[in-house]
Image: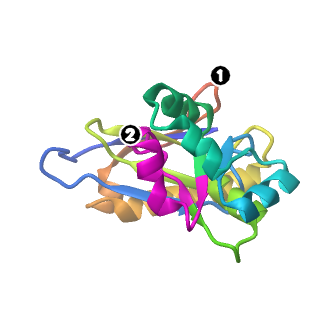
Amino acid sequence: VELQIGLKDYDTQRDKRFAGTIKLPHVPRPRMKICVLGDAVHCEAAQRSGIPFKSVEDLKKLNKNKKMVKKLALSFDAFLASQVLIPQIPRLLGPGLNKAGKFPGLIQHTDNLENKVTELRSNVKFQLKKVLCMGVAVGNVGMTPDELRMNCLMAINFLVSLLKKNWNNIKRLHLKSTMGKPYTVYG
């Protein structure tokens, strides 16, 4: 289920564009594919949890091969990397992941990997580019109406806090499932 937002009175050339990430109370995208780029400890933990992972050796094999890096970036929705690996990633993979907007999140040895993956799955990102509309996943069809409502409220309030004139910048809000009809929530 996606929340579609139409904005008004916002000049993307003049006003600053915004980007923000918020963690929703209920996971909107349980099927999101996440890959762990890890050292030995994290690879082992990922294997136990059944999460796909790549070790340092696997990354070295890619050897900045642009096609392979792009293929890797396209096959997953997000990445998590061990703290020791983060500084090496641009060197090992080149700019491929960054271009795709999927630079890895950080995991430390004290973190529980499964919790971190769940957290990543419940994060949604608002990013205003040149056009005055955007869509963001707030839930899925398997959720109860209450869970969906909580996610929507949280996402909308966060978005309003990012805008320059708060509610005065919002033209329309729609809720829409993948093939379903859009429902106007506001506007």
* 29 lies above or below 114: above
Task: Point out residue 54 in the picture as x, y percentages from the top left corner.
Answer: 67, 46
Q: Magenta residues, as a range? A: 80-105
Residue type indicated by callout 2: Lys
Give me the residue at 47% from left, 57% from top: 88
Q: How is the image coloured?
A: rainbow
For label 2, the SS is: helix
Residue type indicated by callout 1: Met
Mark 1–mark 2 CB contact (< 8 Å): no
Task: Point out residue 76 in the picture as x, y percentages from the top left corner.
Answer: 62, 37
Q: Which quarter of the rendering shows the N terminus?
A: top right
Residue 137 seen anywhere in this rendered image of the structure:
no
Task: Point out residue 56 in the picture as x, y percentages from the top left corner.
Answer: 61, 51
Residue 179's label in the rendered image is 1
Give me the residue at 80% from left, 58% from top: 44
| Depth check, front residue: 131 or 104 | 104
Of badges 1 and 2, the one in the foreground is 2
Q: Which quarter of the rendering shows the C terminus?
A: top left
Q: Residue furthest top?
A: 179
For label 1, the SS is: loop
Q: Quadrant of residue 137?
A: top right
Q: Which residue is mark 2?
A: 99
Residue 163 seen anywhere in this rendered image of the structure:
yes
Q: Would you say residue 92 sits in the magenta stretch?
A: yes
